[in-house]
Amino acid sequence: MKKLFYNYIDTFRGLSIEVWWLALITFINRSGTMIIPFLSLYLREDLGINQANIGWVMTCFGLGSVVGVWLGGKLTDNIGYYKVMVRSLFSTGILFIALQFLDTFATFCIGIFLVMIVADTFRPAMYVAMSVYSKPENKTRSVTLIRLAINLGFSAGPAIGGLIITYLGYGGLFWVDGITCILATLLLVGVLNPRKAKPLDNEVNENPKSVYKDKPYWIFFLAMVFFAFIFMQYFSTMPLYYKDIHSLSELKIGLLLGLNGLLISVTEMPLIAWLETKSYTKIGMTLFGLLLTVLSFLVLNLAPWVGVLLIGIVFMTVGEMVGFPMSNAFAMHRSKRGKQGEYLAMYVMSFSIAGVFGHNAGLQISHFYGYDFTWYLMCGLGLIGVLLLLYLKRILKKRNELY
């Protein structure tokens, strides 16, 4: 047991102090975003918005994210990642607190759209910062550490969120979300000011190639849209499925979703450190992760037993642990061909675009055709993503660009 513990600790060695600070800031910020997994429930239970209209709210959520990510990439390349991160975090905190005072369908659509524009300018800036503060050989593990912080926060957030809803109602979540964003801003200003932090990989391509002319990256982008599209269901349609079909309470839903973050926090870093010692390609591992995520939906239709929910979460978790760090590392490596903000914004945008259509589609289809049909459809869309990644792998192999 002692040896196992030291082996686990060894997987974290060599990462810069700046990446550790960035991980802590991300943890504080992510712990506060506990309203997101409960957003569809909040809209239905507190505001009385029907399921079809909840889908349109989630579309506004995704549209705001797309605009925010695009804007974040542009701003990062023009004014720098630090300024973008500080302004985004602080403003998001204020807007989250204000969001609770919007109580109609139309005003909430506008509010969530504006919140996401501001909030998601942070994401490409954060990835560029992580790349700058990481040695080339440590970038995949740096991604994994940030994801560990995100999932530790996600594991604590929904569980605490369920308790807050139980005892204080949904309004308390907005206050916690806003305050934690502001606290994360104060920490960021204190520890990652460019006058103090030391970059380890600040290489700038003097003759950057446009991401919009990089055909293999476009194929990768489309595959990630499909991957993200089905993954998004766990944050909108799935909580309703848990409640409607299996009669789980908000507390149990929070604990079940929190299990995902807990498993990732314990096993992802050792898993990635082990995979890096193997000859698997990053695209190959992304493909494997997508396949496991497809299986997480398939098992839900195999039996009415509540235990399949746990099996589904485990399949999804392993798929996420393998697929997302490897796809992110591929994007960072590829970004050296052009402007990093532009490349990494496009990677993040695949998730944002999936959010525009994924949340709404899942909610609308499940509302009109039922959950079983919805899960089979998600399996089919995931398999399209698998085919795209197989095609990409073939192209990169021919060009000797497979890594």
Image (tube, rainbow, N blue to C red):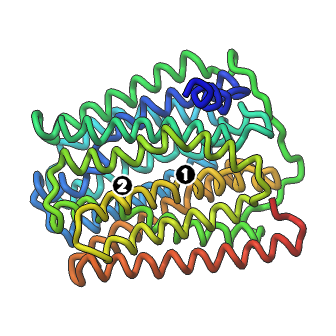
For the C terminus, the quadrant is bottom right
Q: Residue at x 74, y 21 (%)?
A: 198
Kind of residue sitting beneath label 1? Met
Q: Earlier in the sequence, mark 2 or mark 1?
A: 2
Residue 209 visible, this angle: yes
Q: Position of residue 137 (x, y in %)?
A: 79, 39
**Which numbered disc covers residue 174?**
none
Circle 1 SS class:
helix
Q: Residues within 10 Å of mark 2 (few under 14, many from 20)?
A: many
Location of residue 354 in the rendering, given as x and y in whole percent from the top left corner:
47, 66
Depth check, front residue: 57 or 328:
328
Residue 267 horizontal/vertical position (percent): 53, 42
**Of 320 and 182, which appears nearest the observer?**
320
Against 334, residue 124 (above or below) is above
Q: In this orientation, which residue lies closer to the viewer: 244 or 337?
A: 244
In the picture, measured across the screen, residue 124 lies left or right of residue 155, that is right
**Quadrant of residue 54 in the image?**
bottom left
Marks 2 and 1, how far apart at CA: 29 Å
Q: Is residue 70 at all visible to an observer of this figure? A: no
Q: Secondary structure at mark 2?
A: helix
Residue located beneath label 1 in the image: 321
Side of 143 relative to 306 (left or right): right
- Tell me where residue 142 appears, x and y as whole percent: 66, 37
Name above or below for residue 283 compared with residue 208: below
Q: Is residue 275 above or below residue 26?
A: below
Residue 113's mark?
Answer: 2
